[in-house]
Image (spheres, helix red, strand yellow):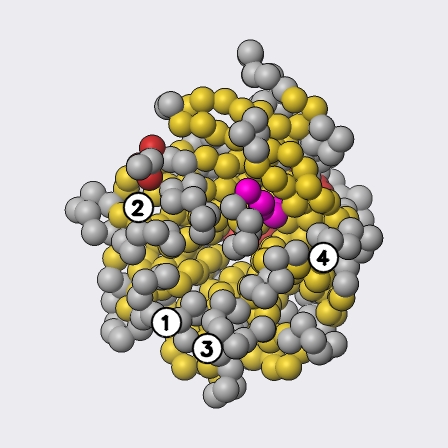
Amino acid sequence: GSGPIPLQRSRPPKARASQHFRVSASCGLLSRASSLLPFRRSRAWRDGVGIPWLTTNFGQFIVRMVDSALVKTFRVPARHGYAVELSPYFPSRLACATSQYYGIAGCGTLVVLEQTEAGIIPFRSFDWNDSLFDVTWSENNEHVLVTGSGDGSLQIWDTANPTGPLQVFKEHSQEVYSVDWSQTRGEHLIVSGSWDQTIKIWDPMVNNSVSTFHGHASVIYSTIWSPHIPGCFASASGDNTLRVWDVKAGGARITIPAHQAEVLSCDWSKYDQNMLVTGAVDCSLKCWDLRNIRLPVHHLVGHTYAIRRVKFSPFHASMLASCSYDFSVRFWDVSKPDSVLETVEHHTEFVCGLDFSLHIPGQVADCAWDETVKIYTPACLTV
């Protein structure tokens, strides 16, 4: 359309609705009925010709060939994907945090899936009474996951106990947009980032947060533990900064004015404890060396709308991936003069979730607002 389309909500607007679409507007997005109107569902796959549909008791999955690469697709009806993470224990298992009505209103569902030779099948699903925005697997129990919700709470789920959450932590006053489980030995901590501008550290064995961090001047979109340094994590915020924090010191060790726009995602290199990447509303990625933060080590451009999530490869030190509101996933190699390796465009809505498999080199999972989760190996990562 030529102008914004008014939103029709089933309940009074919450903070996240205006905040999300402020992000969309600031990166130049035109309002689109399929993205902004609740109750309207994407029909892209349903209108396809010759696509084999396989119906399950929860959703539907499709297997198709694209550029000789196998793409497995699972459809979650009336749920829009926000985050996906492959299991660190089971090569075939993954989890997706989804929301009803694009996360503006309604409930959320945590979907746990299994990939088979034939496609993707449902393993477990858990419903929550508000939107789910992020998910992370436990690093010390293969059946346990954590989600962050629009009601300001974190939920701990056990796939071996499908009756409901084991625990619910409720201290944030606004949406929990990011959760991550510590990867370093000897630590069993969860970090959460919220739109209330605080970061909290949680011990699953304790019923309340063990630390709260202040410092960001806007909403927090991303929090992630260092895979190298115990008690160290990074955060990305709407205040345009990337910050590195020390749990023991109780504050930010490093603050980087990373972009001249909201920073929506950050990730830590699996090979270099000093290297992080950020993705922002300015459509660019930047790689940062914490030993010299004056300028980014790499500045990657190519996306045409805001970058929602960035991920370093666990198998290649110089490779990373990004997904965007431009419906694409891009793969990069910062060691090459032309850093863009491949652009994958197989979604019809905002791509919000992205992850690399820790077990299968080159395998990637992503999810989008078009109600689909996809697993594939891009041509540039095919051995």
Q: Is residue 324 left or right of residue 82?
A: left
For disc 3, the marked residue is: 230
Numbered label attached to residue 332: 2
Residue at disc 4, secondary structure: strand
- Foreground tag (2 vs 3): 3
Residue at disc 1, secondary structure: strand
Q: Which of marks 2 and 4 is nearer the N terminus?
A: 4
Residue 239 among magenta residues = no
- The reply to whether dot 2 and dot 3 touch (C-beta < 8 Å) is no
The amino acid on which the numbered mark 4 sits, given as a three-letter code, is Asp
Numbered label attached to residue 256: 1
Task: Give the spatial CA distance, label 4 vs label 3.
Answer: 25 Å
Residue displayed at 34% across by 43% down: 331
Residue at disc 3, secondary structure: loop
- Kindly indicate the quadrant of the structure image that contains residue 53: top right
Highlighted magenta segment, given as a residue range: 92-96
Task: Give the spatial CA distance, label 2 vs label 4.
Answer: 35 Å
Q: Position of residue 309 (x, y in %)?
A: 47, 51
Residue displayed at 70% across by 24% down: 55
Q: Earlier in the sequence, mark 1 or mark 3?
A: 3
Q: Which of marks 2 and 3 is nearer the N terminus?
A: 3
